[in-house]
Image (cartoon, rainbow, N blue to C red):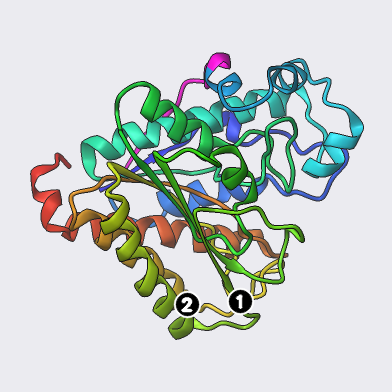
């Protein structure tokens, strides 16, 4: 069973400026619904303002809520922040929080959007407005749901915003595996950064993941894993520089779930990046990713104590 968080506001009308394509989010859900696999959909509440202000600059939060983000910040984000976008990002941030709550009940749950790992303290960047991963990690700790949170970021781009927003917090560990020469040009410092050479293939990528993820899990001993499951390491991704195949992406995702679940840890995934001219093809990669993780979760020994 895949427990997936989705909201109609994830499909905001496309802004008049910018190149980001929002139709991917509808197509992901279409692919999941047509897969024939067991799926339960959950709708999130909008993220409370105070949760966002605990991580982001209150003045910037106000700019987003009132759709008055300055043009220079909109350029960094990649599209205008309209009232529709403001509502969207409140729901996508609420979606990662809900996915974490569902993961603690079922072992694994997915947010069908978000993974907005480039958003910084007082601005968005790289198609990201608010950083749902940092917001969720902060709230899990504040609410007493977790003492330590591991954020695993396998997007092809470094999770610079997440690293910056959680820097110096011993209770949050950020692991970023990304293409060395890809965006952003100036990298932040995660707890552990693994920068890969252009063209790294399935075996090279999985060897790195196998080397570092189990160690992070065992040494940090988190209570929950937040997983940025971007599919842009794929060999045909428009903005990627790596060379993972469909099989390689599935092996990556199943490995993350299996390593966490055999330690009894819940995993909440966020969609992350995935780019191409054929949006249906990209959406299919995201859908297969979530379904593969749900199957791996169902097979995990620790899942036998979880409800379906």
Judging depth in this view, the residue of 302 and 295 nearest the camera is 302
| Secondary-structure class at tag 1 | loop
Q: Which of 104 and 217 is in front in this view?
A: 217
Whether 41 is among the magenta residues is: yes
Residue 244 place in picture, x, y as percent: 52, 77
What residue is disc 1 on? 242
Q: Tell me the SS state at disc 2.
A: helix
Per the model, the C-alpha gap separating discs 2 and 1 is 9 Å
- In the displayed orientation, state which residue is furthest to the right: 71
62 above or below 253? above
Q: Residue at x 25, y 62 (%)?
A: 258
Where is residue 54? Give x, y as percent.
56, 21
Region rendered in magenta: 40-50
Task: Residue 148: name its quadrant.
Answer: top left
Give the left or right position of residue 144, taking residue 59 as reference.
left
Q: Choose top left, top right, bottom left or bottom right for residue 180.
A: bottom right
Report x, y in % for residue 173. Answer: 43, 48
**In the picture, residue 17 is in which quadrant?**
top right
Note whether 247 is above or below 303 in the view shown.
below
Find out whether residue 21 is within the magenta segment: no
Q: Are marks 2 and 1 in contact (CB under 8 Å)?
A: yes
In front of the other: 102 or 170: 170
Residue occupying the point 74% across, 43% down:
125
Q: Mark 2 points at which residue?
A: 205
């Amino acid at each position: 069973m895949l427990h997936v968080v989705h909201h109609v506001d994830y499909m905001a009308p496309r802004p008049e400026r910018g190149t980001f394509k929002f139709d991917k989010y509808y197509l992901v859900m279409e692919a999941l619904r047509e897969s024939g696999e067991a799926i339960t959909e959950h709708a999130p509440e909008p993220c409370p303002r105070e949760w966002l202000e605990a991580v982001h600059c209150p003045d910037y939060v106000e700019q987003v809520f009132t759709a008055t983000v300055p043009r220079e910040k909109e350029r960094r984000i990649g599209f205008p922040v309209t009232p529709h976008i403001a509502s969207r990002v409140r729901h996508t941030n609420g979606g990662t929080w809900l996915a974490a709550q569902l993961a603690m009940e079922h072992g694994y749950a997915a947010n069908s959007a978000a993974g907005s790992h480039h958003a910084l303290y007082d601005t968005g960047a790289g198609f990201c407005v608010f950083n749902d991963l940092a917001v969720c990690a902060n709230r899990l700790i504040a609410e007493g749901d977790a003492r330590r949170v591991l954020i695993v970021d396998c997007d092809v781009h470094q999770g610079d915003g997440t690293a910056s927003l959680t820097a110096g917090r011993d209770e949050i560990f950020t692991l970023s595996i990304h293409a060395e020469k890809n965006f952003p040009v100036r990298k932040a410092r995660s707890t552990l950064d693994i920068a890969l050479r252009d063209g790294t293939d399935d075996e090279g990528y999985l060897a790195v993941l196998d080397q570092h993820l189990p160690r992070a899990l065992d040494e940090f001993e988190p209570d929950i894993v937040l997983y940025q499951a971007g599919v842009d390491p794929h060999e045909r991704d428009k903005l990627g520089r790596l060379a993972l195949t469909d099989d390689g992406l599935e092996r990556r995702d199943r490995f993350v779930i299996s390593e966490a679940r055999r330690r009894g840890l819940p995993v909440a995934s966020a969609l992350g990046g995935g780019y191409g001219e054929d949006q249906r093809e990209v959406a299919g990669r995201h859908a297969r990713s979530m379904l593969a993780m749900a199957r791996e979760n169902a097979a995990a020994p620790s899942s036998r104590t979880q409800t379906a």
